[in-house]
Amino acid sequence: MIERQRPFQARLDDLRLEDALGLIAGRDPAAPFAYVVTPNADHVLRLEAPEGASLRPVYQAAWLSLCDSRILRFLLGLRGYQLSVVPGSDLVAALFERVVRPETPVTLIGGTAEVAARLRARFGLAALAHHEPPMGFEADPAAVEACVRFVLDHPARFVLLCVGSPRQERLAAHLAATGEARGVGLCVGAAVEFIAGVKRRAPAWVQRAHLEWLHRLASEPRRLWRRYLAQAPALLRLTWRLPPAV
């Protein structure tokens, strides 16, 4: 039984990593395409904003919506909401270590040729198909259609959508709408770069201390400073306005 919570416009499913992994691993590969989203604080703020209205149905239609942010879980906990956290990076690492086998068909949308090569080498993948769309592809209908066609032409048990949010979530909804795609799509951003060894995650103790955001900020300050620092007050206001959980 999945306990689905809606403290925000983004639905959050209270599942532990083991439970989420079990559901994903147990899904029939021939079943219609279903996708997993991993909202973090940035996603939540985007969905709460007026311009996020067109994106809300995309998240609500997800098969699983797993909280990716320990900070978000902490703030919700202060308002009485009980929620497990399942970072997309942890989910993908567990999937490759415990479910994916060398012969498992996997399709990767996004990431570089180097990332795909490292994944093949590390896990011995014999059936990894990779497509790297051009920068700004979401504004080009032909480029979006090329992504969709690649997934349809390379059916896989797992489809990793790693082109950044909200592009990957919109692409997942597009795939589901075709009625032709199969497998499970995972909208997991940079997760494959971590398991491929292209980027390093924060040490485990930093993650447990809810400071992984600080580690990432130090690693990519120019890209992330606005997200992590300028948006912090908005997140605090948003969670504080929530009615206490019953």
Image (spheres, rainbow, N blue to C red):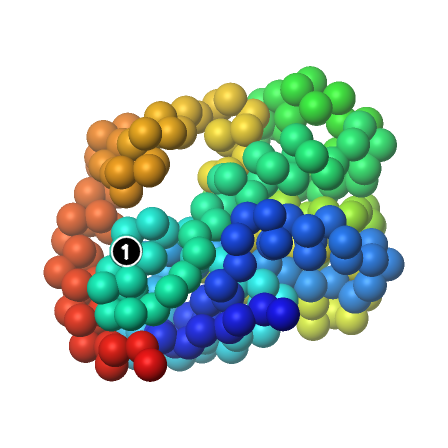
Residue drawn at x 65%, y 40% is: 95
Name the quarter where the C terminus is drawn.
Answer: bottom left
Q: Position of residue 159 (x, y in %)?
A: 69, 48
Name the quarter where the N terminus is drawn.
Answer: bottom right
| Farthest-out residue, top | 121
Using the image as rendered, state which of residue 113 and residue 244 is in the foreground: 244
Examine the image and state in which quarter residue 106 appears.
top right
- The answer to whether residue 174 of the structure is visible from this angle is no
Left or right, residue 232 beside residue 224: left
Element type at mark 1: helix
Q: Position of residue 15 (x, y in %)?
A: 53, 59
Q: Position of residue 206 (x, y in %)?
A: 29, 32
Circle 1 is placed at which residue position?
74
Badge 1 crowding class, 10 Å Cα cut-off, few under 14, some 14 to 19, many 20 or more, is some
Left or right, residue 122 beside residue 221: right
Examine the image and state in which quarter residue 53 appears.
bottom left
Total of numbered circles in the picture? 1
Left or right, residue 97 beside residue 229: right
Residue drawn at x 35%, y 26% is: 203
| Amino acid on which the number 1 mark rests in the picture | Phe
Left or right, residue 49 beside residue 1: left
User: Is 240 rendered above or below residue 99?
Assistant: below
- The answer to whether residue 77 of the structure is visible from this angle is yes
User: Is 43 rendered above or below residue 125?
Assistant: below
Examine the image and state in which quarter residue 202 appears.
top left
Q: Position of residue 49 (x, y in %)?
A: 29, 74
Residue drawn at x 50%, y 66% is: 13
Residue drawn at x 78%, y 32% is: 101
User: Is 69 rendered above or below residue 106?
Assistant: below
Using the image as rendered, state which of residue 154 and residue 89 is in the foreground: 89
